[in-house]
Amino acid sequence: MKKPKMLFIYPDIGSNSISFSPAIEILSAVLEQQEVEVELIHIHEKHGVPFDHQILFEQIQQASPDVIGMTSTSYQYDISNEIAGQLKERGIKVPIVLGGIHANISPEDLKESKFDAFCTGEGEVPLSEMFRRIRTGEELTTIPGFHFKSADGRVITNPASKVIRNLDDLPMRNYGIMNTQQILTLKNKWLSIAFSRGCPYACNFCINQKLKLNHRQTESGKYFRINSVNRALSELTGLIDKYGAHIDVINLDDDLLILEKEWFIEFANRFEKEIFKPYGIKYAINVRANLINEELISVMARSGCDLVRVGFETGNQEMRNRVLGKGISNRHLFQVFDLFHKYELRSLAFAMLGIPGETESSIQDSLNMLRKLQPTLIRMAIFEPFIGTPLYDYCIENGLIDNGNQTHENCFDRSALSFKDLSQSQLQLYHILFPWHLNLGFVGEYSTLYKELITTYSRLDQEQHSLEGIRARILMDDRIISEKLNKEGIAHYEYFENNNFYYHLAKPLKLSSPKWSETVIQS
């Protein structure tokens, strides 16, 4: 008897870098365990299948699936919906379903979409049930965890599906469904994986609150769940056996893996013994400034931690806490970065511009604080009001969303908001020239060069020069001045790996005593 078949389509669009899809890796493993054949079309203009409707249609015809599934963020939703519409116009009759973040936070979009169904929670249980019913010929439109669209256009809303309480019950992820070796090469040998689900915090800009509400509807126990240490290490060693020659860093992509302190200490100790020492492979991890302490940082430093990432967001404490709802003080940030320097750990600060209420003064707050924190890397995004978050509601209620700027492919192009005291062009210039503004604070006589460059680019007519062209020129000019500073041994921020929105601290300065946390901030 022929196995039923699931075809995943991953619209990996909007970035030069090709990415892993954790959802497809685990869902394909679950389906294979149940004797379902799986296949993937990984759309990427440079390194995957081209975004060409005819090519996609031909590959789908050849695959002959029983179900087509896409996973999509809100950035990718319009493209995903376009693909579904084109497939239907070309005669594809099998169900086309959408999962991922957008289906969870905007289930009402199903009615006007080209999809037949949205998966509105974790997909393992409902997708497995779909293929069980395909085998038996049962009705699909009543599956818990799916919202379906009937033939007459009505939306059939089903109750939430149960979620996986014990993550160890899931099979090992199916990295083989993707071109993992190619992705590892293109990502400088960084392999991304996560061992937990959920986050107990409720930042106003994060969709976690919406996902947590969805989870409550399942009555499936604790929202934050984590694999056992044994399972995590077993999966990592299995991946190293297969791809070890192509892995330098395990990127732990969890929201907050240190939430269970004892778990993390056991994991780090075993990682040091079983992975770092025998293979030389390191790890990167996300932390929260009010949860990390010297004990955990010392464990990280000796166990092979390559990079610690922290949500800095903004140097304006009121905006960070009152607007963003982070609950992180300036003191927390100064203390934790102080410790990173003490233990010589590389750090990354997640930062953003264009928060509701942003002004030139609040941008200066961020510049001043980052000069003092001196993270090894900074990733600078533009705030995005995601549907389903408290800040999205706030922006709608206060008329802050500029409808002409809502549709874009990522959080690095432009703001979706309008500001009282800051124009779009001013915000965009701060964004693309941010490391040069940073350098004005600590490169001495070379600050004149950065001032001249900032002035030159501020005068450019952005309507007459493509944004891509401006960014390319900025990177070229930055390389020239950075080479001069490197020869002089002067610490400065430079654009990182030809990327306009990642900045690297070249020749990091040693922090001197007394520490920043003791002298700079008392809040």
Image: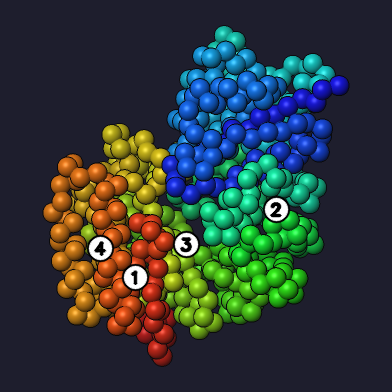
Front position among marks 1 and 2: 1
Secondary structure type for disc 4:
helix
Comes first in the chain, label 2 or label 3: 2
Point 51% across, 22% down: residue: 54
| Residue picked out by circle 2 | 225
Q: Where, by quadrant of the figure, is residue 492 drawn?
A: bottom left
Question: If the image is split into quadrants, where does the N terminus sit?
Answer: top right
Comes first in the chain, label 1 or label 2: 2
| Residue picked out by circle 1 | 493
Judged left or right of residue 310, residue 182 is: right
Judged left or right of residue 518, residue 487 is: left
Q: Position of residue 136 (x, y in %)?
A: 83, 19
Judged left or right of residue 45, residue 27 is: right
Of residues 115 and 385, which is closer to you in this image?
Answer: 115
165 relative to 396, above or below? below
Q: Position of residue 58 (x, y in %)?
A: 58, 22
Q: Distance of mark 2 from mark 4, alpha carbons?
A: 47 Å
Front position among marks 3 and 4: 4
Kindly tell me whether residue 281 is visible in this rendering. yes
| Residue picked out by circle 4 | 477
Of residues 188 and 349, which is closer to you in this image?
Answer: 188
Secondary structure type for disc 1:
strand
Q: Distance of mark 2 from mark 3, alpha carbons?
A: 21 Å
Q: Distance of mark 1 from mark 4, alpha carbons?
A: 13 Å
Q: Position of residue 85 (x, y in %)?
A: 50, 20
Comes first in the chain, label 1 or label 4: 4
Front position among marks 2 and 4: 4
Other residues around mark 2 within 10 Å, as few (<14) / some (14–19) / many (≥20)? some
